[in-house]
Image (tube, grey):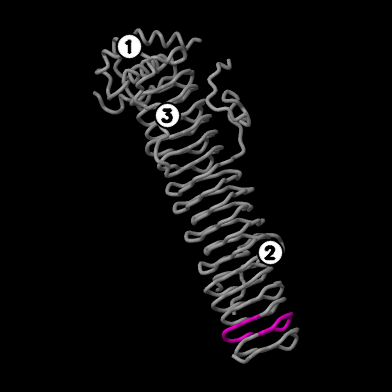
Amino acid sequence: MAQARTTTRSDGSSSLAARIGSGARVRGRIHGDGDLLIEGNVEGDLAIRGDLTIAEGGTLTSKAIEAQSVTIGGTLEGDVSASGPVRLVSGANVRGNLRGSAVAIDEGARFSGRLDCEFDLPPELGGSSRTETRGRSTARR
Amino acid sequence: MASTVIGAGITIEGEVTTDEDVVVSGTLRGKLTAKDAVTIEHGATVEADVAGGSLVVAGSLTGNVTAAERVDLQQGARVIGNVKAARVTIADGAQFKGNVDMDV
Amino acid sequence: MASQSSNLSVIGRAARVRGRITGAVDLEVQGYVEGEIAVGGDVTVDSGAMIGSSVHGRRLVVRGAVKGDLTADEAILLEDGARVVGDVRAPRVAIAPGALVRGFVDTGANGSAAPRTARAQAPATRSAPVAVKHVPAPPTKPAAKSAAAPAVASHLAGSAAATPKNAGPRRPPPPVVPALKKAKGQIAKKKER
């Protein structure tokens, strides 16, 4: 019968550890090591030490999503906290807040939510923008 | 190749439903319903009621099992729960505790 | 020759502008701007540029640093090197790898939270800081290339010429409208401050 040829190796390399096929639906929490590919419908929190991919046609609804890198070509509703880059490709439909080392949104991707990348503005614009004051026009000279 | 694969490092707590087949190598707690073949590999831990078209178990399964066609418990399998299917095989070396109902 | 190219205004690298910039123009910012930008054309924020306020245009291409909201009627492109703290809204938004954003982003947004119009209507009354936009040149307006508040356009162009590091290689300098010469003087003055 079908061998799970996609098991993770014990050396820690992340191969595709889990795949939720297009006809599958998961309601519940998913966590663990390895990459996750969602082609079906998943509802629930996610915390994986691997890369998350939501294929076109895949849907993820969640309150908390943690992964290394995240690539979204399908639908996502929820907040993402990635240790690596987050990328929305054309066809993606995302509502939620994204945090990652970098966030890229391709032309054709739909997104509505907050982006939170870690970086500092140049000092002339206020350096670390934690102060969150926009449009200050004081002559700081 | 299975359409849904729950790999060795992954734990799912909840319900999994699919109209295709599933291979579980990781951990599943909750409920699993598939239309086609379900494979629970050696090393997998399933604490759930499982329903499928057919079932092959080589890992650990605690829960009730219902298959439309057949259930095969392979060597190394540890199953605690009731099994209901038209055909059931329990291989030498498989551990099983529960009722078997082949009266479909 | 009233081609679109003559509608391009440039804030050169060494320029510092404090005050609103409006007009039916294309704008390229290489330097520092603090004070709302609301133009009717395309806005390009170059990689070394710094903008400390909101920006609105038809299309925005950002490679520099912006602290303020970005809105556009058509599209916003944040390219590698962009650093944006503020909201980003446009019917089309693309964020390339390497662009960093902190704020609310809405692609497919209904165009513009167009601040106070790119048409630069009112503000004549606005006082002080508005160095750039202000020009009381209205009468000779027609010379300006486009509809509405175009006085600002040539006006800007004039000031751009004043800054070193002008966008030399890019386009021929726009014609200078005589009536604006005095305005230009005003600008220079403000800039020194």
Decide if residue B47 is on the left or right side of residue A6: right
**In the rendered image, residues at marks 1 and 2 fall on the same chain:** no
Q: Secondary structure at mark 2?
A: loop
Q: Tell me where the magenta segment starts and ends, as one range.
A: B65-83
Q: Chain of mark 1?
A: C
The percent position of residue A6, horizontal first and vertical second, equals 61, 68
| Mark 1 vs 2: CB contact within 8 A | no
The tag on residue B9 is 2
Please name the residue shown 58% across and 40% down the image: A116
In this picture, is C46 found above or below B15?
A: above
**Which three-letter amino acid code belongs to the residue tagged 2?**
Gly
Dominant SS in magenta: strand
Q: Which quadrant of the figure contains the C terminus of chain B? A: bottom right
**Which three-letter amino acid code belongs to the residue tagged 3?**
Pro
Please name the residue shown 73% across and 85% down the image: B98
User: Does the rendering let one see residue C161?
Assistant: no
| Closer to us: A77 or A9 | A77
The tag on residue B55 is none
The tag on residue C180 is 1
Mark 3 Cα within 10 Å, few/some/many (few <14, many 20+)?
Answer: few
Query: Which residue is the site of mark 3?
Result: C115
Magenta stretch contains residue C19: no
| Mark 1 vs 3: CB contact within 8 A | no
| Closer to us: C23 or B5 | C23
In this picture, is B30 found above or below A32?
A: below
First in sequence: mark 1 or mark 3? 3
Q: Secondary structure at mark 1?
A: helix
